[in-house]
Image (spheres, rainbow, N blue to C red):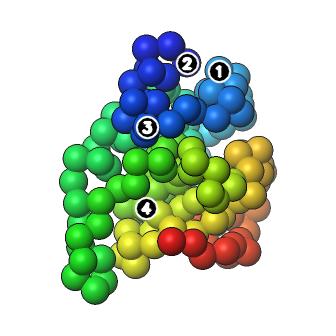
Amino acid sequence: MKPEVIQELEVLCEASLPADYVQLLGSYPPLLRAVCRSDSGDDSEGIVSEVELFSLPADVLEINREVRAISILDPDGQEFRWPDQLLVIGETGEGDYYCVDLDGEHAGVLQFRHHAVEFEVIADSLEEFVEMLIESFVTGSESGDDFDDSESDETE
């Protein structure tokens, strides 16, 4: 990842990026770089490296700017603004985001569910998240659709 993009993300998130995430972007898994998201194998639904786990630092920066530029209402009608310490690393393609907590309060990868306006731990580490993506999109496991069936811990 380019040093200037890292700096911009760290300023935006008010925290340092985790070394394992910077390393992941620097050596993005080749299996995920071009795999299609659709079951049919065409790219009509995009590719994993452009949606679930961004491979381009510019995409990471752009999505993090976007989520911080708006506020939404939670189910109770309260304004929700994106927490500074949460770095968006991908999305589901259906309005939910995958992120990591730069403060380390929540380990692993969280999924932001936009309808409920809540966060849920879906993987205990970045490595586990990558394995889930490979299992879901490369090896064709049926257990991985948006990772909704994975065991998880809800967080706030």
**Label 1 to label 4: alpha-carbon separation:** 25 Å
| Residue 66 pos. (x, y %) | 28, 44
Q: Nearer the viewer, mark 1 or mark 3?
A: 3
Amino acid type at circle 2 is Met
Q: Which residue is mark 4?
A: 96
Q: Of marks 1 and 3, which one's residue comes earlier in the chain? A: 3
Rendered residue at 75%/58% (across/down): 124
Q: Which residue is mark 2?
A: 1
Amino acid type at circle 4 is Asp
Q: Of marks 1 and 4, which one's residue comes earlier in the chain? A: 1
Amino acid type at circle 1 is Gly
Q: Of marks 3 and 2, which one's residue comes earlier in the chain? A: 2
Viewer can see residue 136: no
Q: Of marks 2 and 4, which one's residue comes earlier in the chain? A: 2
Q: Is residue 2 above or below residue 85?
A: above
Res. 26 mark:
1
Q: How many marks?
A: 4
Verify CB contact (< 8 Å) between mark 3 and mark 2: no
Choose between 52 and 118: the one closer to the eye.
118
